[in-house]
Image: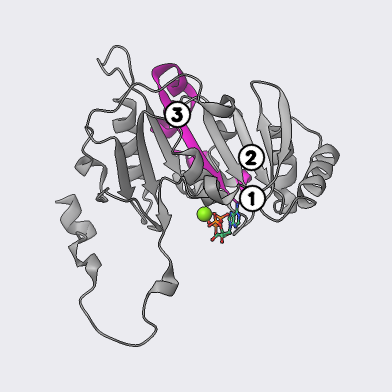
Amino acid sequence: MRPETAPPEPAGGIRFTDRVIVLGRSGSGKSELVNHLAVMPRCQILKWDSKDEFTIAGVEPVYRPEDIRWDERVIHLVDDSCELEDVDRLFRLCWDRKVGRTGHAYGLVVVVHELGDLCLDAPQKTPRAVINYLKKGRAHGLGLIGASQRPRNIPVSARTEVQHVFTFSSGLDPDDLPIAAKMHRMTVPEFEQALEQARGLGEHAYIWGDLRAGRNTIRPQLPDHLRAQSLAQGIDARNYSQTHDIRPSPRTTRPSREAAQS
Ligand SMILES: Nc1ncnc2c1ncn2[C@@H]1O[C@H](COP(=O)(O)OP(=O)(O)OP(=O)(O)O)[C@@H](O)[C@H]1O
Ligand SMILES: [Mg+2]
């Protein structure tokens, strides 16, 4: 199905061409919020599933960038090896989707639940194509929704190009506080006070920094009816047997890395 042209300004002031970053400790609710934000754009969505942790109803995952069918509206790419050369290849292909001179008329939003995986937690190793996408993609209809526990480990351009930053009330590692405070355009004491205020609203409450509007707001946890509007469902290990019951795995269809590269 051909993706539709995305509206420039969905609810809440988030545009599909924005860089949207969700921060918080493990279990704070980042993935839930990312999956909810990812249902808003009506353009093409590419979920880069670097932990192989999601299923998307009606979408068959692919395991290498070359197997992506670019005519699908929602693409689910599973890559839990996160080799930087593969990441670079993927973002080169995404760059080819830029609107305008390429003849494409609709946008693309890449969804990444662990932004540190784009550079193996070493910002100086960020592949060139990722930097290009982050820095120049906005003008070409290329957006990003991402999450991280450790903003100091994500590509620097993801931090500097951000338009919307969400931080969960559980806060961050102390080393990351100055980085996150800067992303929210707050001083560290202001940021700590805002986190304290958010904690008063609950463990999944968050601060939403809308940098275009120059505003931070503290929000209660995403209510259940909005959590239900989600791009993907997490694979829940509790659904699997604990007994040593040897049966063919449904994942035997996944190609080996060698086969995938041949
Ligand atoms: N708005 C919410 N209301 C109630 N429970 C929530 C909410 N958001 C998240 N949770 C609970 O928190 C759990 C963890 O959420 P989620 O997987 O999104 O965390 P995460 O920050 O992505 O963690 P990780 O860093 O380990 O990936 C969910 O399974 C859910 O039970
Ligand atoms: Mg997560």
Q: In the picture, residue 143 is in which quadrant?
A: top left
The residue to which callout 1 is attached is 24
- Dot 2 amino acid type: Phe
Magenta span includes 150: yes
Q: Earlier in the sequence, mark 3 or mark 2?
A: 3
Counting from the top left corner in percent of width and height, residue 133 is at: 42, 28
Q: Is residue 45 magenta?
A: no
Would residue 229 be found to the left or right of residue 105 on screen?
Answer: right
Which sits in the foreground, 69 or 101? 69
- Determine the secondary structure under disc 1: loop
Residue of label 2: 166
User: Mark 3–mark 1 contact, CB under 8 Å?
Assistant: no
Would the CB of label 1 be found within 8 Å of ligand 1? yes
Q: Is residue 121 visible?
A: no
SS at mark 2 in the image: strand
Precedes in sequence: disc 2 or disc 1: 1
Estimate the x, y position of residue 239 in percent, counting from the top left: 40, 73
* Badge 3 vs badge 2, beta-carbon distance below 8 Å: no
Q: Is residue 258 above or below residue 65?
A: below
| Colour scheme employed for the rendering of this structure | one colour
> Which segment is the magenta one?
124-152
The amino acid type, in three-letter code, at marker 1 is Gly
Circle 3 residue: 143
* Label 3 secondary element: strand
Amino acid residing under circle 3: Gly
Residues marked 2 and 1 touching at CB (< 8 Å): yes
